[in-house]
Image (cartoon, helix red, strand yellow):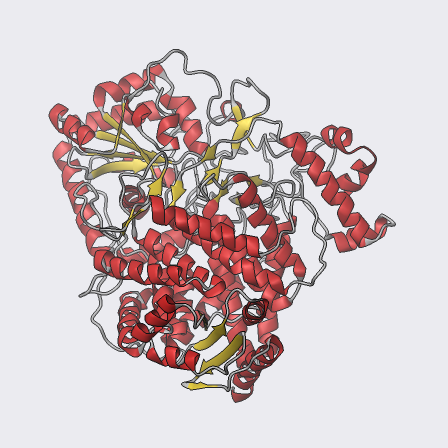
Amino acid sequence: MSRTKRPSDTVARLDPNNCVHMSPAASAPVFSHFPRPLPLPPTPMLSTLLLRHRLTATASPTRSPLRVLASSSSAMSSSASSSSPHGGRKPNRLAAEHSPYLLQHAHNPVDWYPWGDEAFEKARAKDVPIFLSIGYSTCHWCHVMEVESFENEEVAKLLNDWFVSIKVDREERPDVDKVYMTYVSALHGGGGWPLSVFLAPNLKPLMGGTYFPPDDKYGRPGFKTVLRKVKEAWETKRDTLERTGNLVIEQLTDALSAKASLQDLPNDLADVCVDQCVEKLASSYDPKFGGFGSAPKFPRPVEDYIMLYRYRKLMEAGKESEAQNIKKMVTHTLDCMARGGVHDHVGGGFHRYSVDECWHVPHFEKMLYDQGQIVNVYLDTFLITGDEYYSTVARDILDYLRRDMIGKEGEIFSAEDADSAEYEGAPRKKEGAFYVWTSKEIEDALGENAELFKNHYYVKSSGNCDLSPMSDPHNEFNGKNVLIERKPASLMVSKSGKSLDEYSQILGACRQKLFDIRSKRPRPHLDDKVIVSWNGLAISAFARASQILKSGQSGSRFNFPVAGCNPAEYLEVAEKAANFIKVKLYDASSKRLHHSYRNGPSKAPGFLDDYAFLINGLLDLYEFGGNIEWLLWAIQLQVTQDELFLDKQGGGYFNTLGEDPSVLLRVKEDYDGAEPSGNSVAAINLIRLSSILDAAKSTGYKRNVEHLLAVFETRLRQLSIALPLMCCAADMLSVPSRKQVVLVGEKGSAEFQDMVAATFSSYDPNRTVIQIDLRNTEEMEFWDSNNANIAQMARSSPPGKQAVAHVCQDFKCSPPVTSPEALLELLNKTLAAASSAA
């Protein structure tokens, strides 16, 4: 079920991590430029313009020039990939690959090559263009284009006769994807997946777009027409095309490798960029349904992160009224998300995005990078509000991951598809088939409780996808229901004549029954690839939850799909995932990471995001779990990251190693989108490390952050809404002395663990926690070598105590305390002191 719209119907929101079928700007208009050179903006403006394209696509879809172009609704109604056999076709080269996405195409009649020298040499030998198709295994519109074009014998013959065809998994090779997505975005104002680009044999781009229907429609070219026109242009206007491709790559190289001299940052940068970003977000806030911007609505956790960060700063400044307004925006957004259909009420976790403004009808794929970040936002909101509703949603997501997304060795998988068969043996898959319900299915399953459940989740015999004109414009969900809580249980319970506890238990039991029934349906495809960066985000969430959730009320009752486990179990999940990466994806001799794992490590090396996101997760593992092993590894990975990616002269980090000549661009990414940028996360990592180690090492870390921020200063000022996490990094750097909480004692003791839990029972993004056990020789040797002041503080702790806490800020330390109550009082005093000083 594609829920497609004709070109005049709506505007497509092209998130950088979204599977989008087509935009005229990224497809058909390119032929109006053939064979003339494609003009680019002046180089100094180009990098900012690229950010504006991406931001417009994610934050202001109503102003985006990119409109949906769909093939006919009858062709799309079955959407997605085939669940039928391969028709006796012999496998192509992709059958030898490990990527789930490439394997999905291993029986296409297209003579696919994986990205590599064999394909490049073939193109040079035949002197023909390359057709490059980039997507990922859970991308709905990638499946559509496969069914329509790549399984089509006529299209395959054109590709095989005229081109060398290469298939790339964007999750396996984000470096290759970045080059050609940047090209398409720069020229046409946006992009998405599947990404379709034609290259010269030297890999320079000739033209590109996203999804192409097989045949001409709505006055726009179909894929067969595209192939013929590219062939004709290659034969008649080749020199012009190649000159244009060379020029584009030269200009993009200049624009995306920004440099800065190392100098003091302006004192006002932090305040200006944070304030401006929050103001921009607040101006786009939807007071009715929450979220920032209009439909389609994507969870972008970095938006909530900076809003909560600003809330804390306003509270410290004594501006409580302004702070409460910001908090309300975040809590209302999270409430609407959790009650909406974008949240899987039966199985837990969140879908990729909502096609409507009310978070109801989603695009049904589930991505690991979303789950980890969303958990952390709900955890932070729980700390601020004390409302266990938010901690329960966090548990919901974590329990979904534990149940459905974790392998036997603790590795965490990448994604679940949006599409699945409606029944065993169905000829085609449909989007959402696994998740939607008819009213009769619910009545048959739930019996006497069916009416209560239907009222609560707005279930109707005619189907409930009617809350917005954008939810289901072609009635493809007619008679189907996507569960949504239009009102919270606390308001619905009064009509039932039951207590809230009994009402909630009934809903939980009903969800359990539906889960059991749903489990017998054909499941969506699981992409069991293990990506280091996404695992890093999940490791952070599990580690933080292991302590933050201890702040909940004892004896709290949980209902399915929340398991209600001891939060300490989440720490075990985080440690197993980290250990899997260390054993399977880390070379101890070279101290380098691989990017991903499936049946063995991938050929691709680790990228900046892999190092930065994993270091962040390891720092959380240390701070929340206390095992020095993770801190030691984080420090070593930071050394490797600096060696491989740091621009020592120009500042900031490149996304790639620069060692692969087939990757034409070496980019310094700064956009905090569906995933934060590697540079933003790296900046915060460096600030955290600088508060752990002594001045000699700390100075170097801070200098690298200053240089990084100088590289992106212009964009932090002009387009801060595109860089919310980097804005927070700039503010963190401006804090004179980050708060340190040093916990000393027997880590395994209940007293020590109570002290740790007390430390993390409040929200403070500018806090570093150090855990030390004096009995651990390795630990003490580390502190003696890396921060003698911390080692001395630990040794001077009052003797005979199983847990002692030292709190230091503004270059002074409070007297040590020995109980959780005293520590809480001390931590609250520091916040009160900051507020009164303001």
Q: In which quarter of the image is the N terminus?
A: top right
| Residue at x-position 33% and y-position 14% | 90
Relative to 117, 292 lies left or right:
right
| Residue at x-position 60% and y-position 56% | 334
Which residue in the rendered view is the most extreme toward the bottom?
837
Most foreground residue, 460 or 728: 728
Residue 618 in the image, given as x and y percentages of width and height: 40, 58
Residue 39 in the image, given as x and y percentages of width and height: 23, 47
Relative to 103, 509 lies left or right:
right
Quadrant for residue 269, please give it: bottom left
Residue 64 in the image, given as x and y percentages of width and height: 43, 49
Q: Does the rendering let one see residue 418?
A: yes
Which residue in the rendered view is the most extreme toward the top?
88
Most foreground residue, 799 or 726: 799
Residue 346 in the image, given as x and y percentages of width and height: 65, 40
Most foreground residue, 782 or 809: 782
Most foreground residue, 509 or 212: 509
